[in-house]
Image (tube, rainbow, N blue to C red):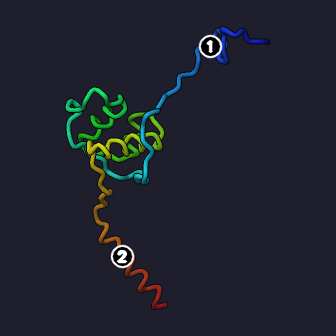
Amino acid sequence: MAQSPSSGAAGADQPAPALRVCAGTTRRRGTLDLVAVIGATRPASALGPGCRPEQVAIIRLSQRPISVAELAAHLELPVSVVRVFLADLLRQRLIVVRPPQFPGRQRDDEILGAMLDGLRAL
């Protein structure tokens, strides 16, 4: 069945697929860990009119500490796309990135050290 020029690739009965355009963003230089904690440095209401809707959403969501993975899930975007937006926001100093905190981490290191000592004694 031939398609008419006016129907396009999607066909006459089907709408054209929606594409999310992320042009105009910078490439990330480093990789943000999935569990890195993101925090906004100012409220979303303080952002200028040039911010993309996704960036505003990230600032709103990161008013409380939130991980990169959680942001991607809330925004329903691939992690790679969220990382690019985060890199832009970090460059503009609109967010801060902190390594994840694992309570009891030092104790875990002590246990692992004791296990290694025990294995070496064998």
Q: Residue, x 48% and y 39% (percent of image)? A: 78
Q: Residue, x 32% and y 57% (percent of image)? A: 99
Name the side, left or right, on which 6 lies relative to 88.
right
- Label 2: element kind: helix
Is 56 above or below relative to 68? above
Q: Position of residue 66 (x, y in %)?
A: 31, 45
Name the side, left or right, on which 4 lies relative to 114.
right
Q: How many marks?
A: 2
Q: CA distance from mark 2 to mark 1?
A: 60 Å
Q: Quadrant of residue 52?
A: top left
Q: Nearer the viewer, residue 46 or 25?
A: 25
Q: Position of residue 70 (x, y in %)?
A: 38, 43
Is 28 above or below relative to 14? below
Q: Position of residue 104 (x, y in %)?
A: 29, 66
Q: Mark 2: give few (<14), some (14-19) or many (20+) Cα within 10 Å.
A: few
Which residue is disc 2 drawn over?
111
Kindly report which numbered mark, 2 or 1, lies closer to the viewer in this rendering.
1
Q: Amino acid at mark 2?
A: Ile
Q: Nearer the viewer, residue 49 or 120?
A: 49
